[in-house]
């Protein structure tokens, strides 16, 4: 496979397409993670990023190593995106999870009252 990609000069294109697909995959993952877990799941993306960095360093095949690196840094970027997604939900651009809102209101009733100044 590597020989074919190298011979036909397709290595860069393959890595580019894969990067596009990985980033496209992480977008809905971040949305779903924020919806069901909120921002408390940021550490999952950190752990995944560290694991994929290690895999990228261990794997000798260039395409697989590169893909592992792309997944690693997409995971790291998702940490920021989880917090940005919370802001997008607050703006009304994405739906809030009604079950999580009820739990947050019970845990912090004063924080969610609009009469508090």
Image: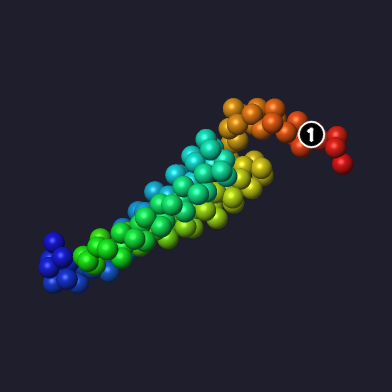
**Residue 99, picture quadrant:** top right
Image point (47%, 54%), residue name: 46
Toward the viewer: 55 or 112?
A: 55
- Of the 4 image quadrants, the one containing the N terminus is bottom left
Image point (62%, 42%), residue name: 89
Image point (31%, 62%), residue name: 56
Question: Where residue 61 sits: x, y (%)?
Answer: 21, 65
Question: Where residue 9 sits: x, y (%)?
Answer: 19, 72
Q: Is residue 90 above or below residue 19?
A: above
Q: Give the number of marks.
A: 1
Residue at disc 1, secondary structure: loop
Kindly identify which residue carries mark 1.
110
Question: Where residue 27 sits: x, y (%)?
Answer: 46, 49
Question: Where residue 55 sits: x, y (%)?
Answer: 30, 59
Residue 31 appearing in the image: no
Toward the viewer: 89 or 109?
A: 109
Residue 80 appearing in the image: yes
Badge 1 crowding class, 10 Å Cα cut-off, few under 14, some 14 to 19, many 20 or more, is: few
Q: Is residue 112 above or below residue 40?
A: above
**Residue 22, picture quadrant:** bottom left
- Of the 4 image quadrants, the one containing the C terminus is top right
Locate residue 105 relative to residue 73 in the image: left or right: right
Locate residue 1 relative to residue 79 in the image: left or right: left
Image point (54%, 41%), residue name: 34
Which color scheme is applied? rainbow
Q: Is residue 8 above or below residue 110?
A: below
Locate residue 7 relative to residue 107 in the image: left or right: left
């Amino acid at each position: 496979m590597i020989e074919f990609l190298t011979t036909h000069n397709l290595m860069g294109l393959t890595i580019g397409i894969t990067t596009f697909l990985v980033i496209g995959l992480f977008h809905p993952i971040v949305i779903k993670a924020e919806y069901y877990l909120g921002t408390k799941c940021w550490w999952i993306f950190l752990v995944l990023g560290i694991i994929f960095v290690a895999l990228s360093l261990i794997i000798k095949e260039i395409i697989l190593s590169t893909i592992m690196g792309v997944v690693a840094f997409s995971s790291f970027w998702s940490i920021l995106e989880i917090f940005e997604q919370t802001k997008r939900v607050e703006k009304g651009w994405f739906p809030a999870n009604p079950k999580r809102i009820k739990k947050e209101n019970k845990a912090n009733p004063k924080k969610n009252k609009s009469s508090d100044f």
